[in-house]
Image (cartoon, rainbow, N blue to C red):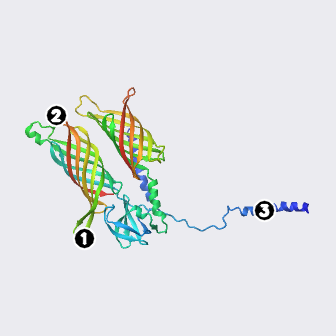
Amino acid sequence: MRLSSIPCLLLCTPLLALAQHKTDGTDQVVVPQVERREISVPHFPSNDFELGLFAGTYATQNFGSSAVAGLRLGYHITEDVFVEAAYGQTKVSDANFRQVLPGGVFADSKETLSYYNLAAGYNVLPGEVFFGSKVAKASAFYIIGGIGSTNFVDQKRQTFNVGFGARLLFSDRFAVQADVRDHIFSLDLLGKRQSTQNPEVTLGVTLFF
Amino acid sequence: MKIARLIAVCVLLAAWAAPSARAAQPAAPDSERLQVNDAFIELHTGPGRGYPVFFVAERHQWITVEMRHTDWYRVRAEGGQVGWVQRQQLTNTLTAAGTTKGFRDVLLDDYLARRVEVGASWGRFKSEPMLKVWSAYRLSDTLGVEATLGQVQGLFSGTDFWHVNLNVEPWSDQRWSPYFGVGLGKFNNIPNNSLVNATPVNANLANAALGLRVHLSERFVARADYTLYTALVSDAHSSEYRALTLGLSFFF
């Protein structure tokens, strides 16, 4: 009896192995027919960047005011905070000095003043402007300040600027903005170095993209 | 020199063209239909909390997201009303597939995928005022490259400079995170016309910087850095300058 059971067991071992293999769990009994859904993440168009042209009046201390024009590139980081880089240019005349000093102050009667600056702005008063009783357009009043450089009569001077402005959005892409800015830099033109205040008032158009 | 410039232009053009080429392959939808799952969401007349709420879309209504301005999304309601909804209000909406995952994931992915940072700093270079802007790209959590463009405005001369740095930020997951960087670039010193016999000086520069970044909010980082500049004026002569600046940067 014992002797006969051994070969019987030996015969059964491959079967046992087979049975073990079947209950291993690595082979899936039911293969689900799931179709993989292709998820394409939506990419919403945005308009955080702005590009603008502006023109207005720049009042150079001691020299009177002159027409200024420039351009700006901005980026809106949050609903409140935005940053912008601006470049502007104006032609300053020393005609007032030439009336009393025949030689004037400049070599030519007109000198180009150019500036660039980096500024950060904060929208303090978001609101709406009403045109009649049916149409309302979004607007914002902002304060702004920054640092840059002014190039005037071969002097490159570090320039601080502070100011405020208002932006009126006619559509999601287009705005008109008015800006008042004081440019503060030191200048050595009239015999001694002095800090000058140079206010600027401009009106500009802005495209958001 | 010309060839190097040409290569640089080509690389820039390639970098400019790459994202658009990628975008062209699978047309990602530029709007998405969502179902309101909160009690209601508020539509403002403009992209900001100060603009009045003029419409409320209730639970189970369908809305279409069309456009984004900062953290605000322009939404079209079933009835055709178009207004601006803040991001947080959209995180609980359901996508067309019935899951809440979609929109929230987009926002989280946006946050985690932030690699490009732009900032400006102001400070002292020796004792003269210095202004610099930089753009940084994160290669990994702890490593980044940074390109800087700056100007030092002295009383007697003005210096323009640029340099490219490799930055290491070992604890970039911390709110207060120190970093270290080294880089190479160029100085271009132009004396004011009032100086006699002064000539413009071009010199290569090497710099090592040690700084501290402080994450102020999700988008903003303040940073202070101390940089040691070495101007390699000639083979035999170099001069050193120390600069200390404070700045603010933000993620795109």
Q: Quadrant of residue B41?
A: bottom left
Quadrant for the N terminus of chain B, please. Answer: top left
* Mark 3 vs 1: CB contact within 8 A: no
Residue at 46% across, 57% down: B108
Q: Mark 1 — on which chain does it sit?
A: A
Residue A55 visible from this viewpoint:
yes
Q: CA distance from mark 2 to mark 3?
A: 108 Å
Which labelled disc corresponds to residue A134? 1
Residue A30 in which image quadrant: bottom right
Q: Is residue B101 above or below residue B146?
A: below
Which dot marks residue A16? 3
Which residue bears the numbered disc 2? Answer: A191
Mark 2 and 1 residues: CB-CB less than 8 Å, in contact? no
The amino acid sitting under disc 1 is Lys
Asked if B104 appears above or below B131 in the picture, the reply is below
Residue at 49% over, 69% down: B98
Mark 3 or mark 1: which comes first in sequence? 3
Circle 3 marks a residue in which chain?
A
Q: Residues within 10 Å of mark 3 (few under 14, many from 20)?
A: few
The picture places residue A34, in percent across and down from the top left corner, at 57, 67
User: B133 and A129: which one is in front?
Assistant: A129
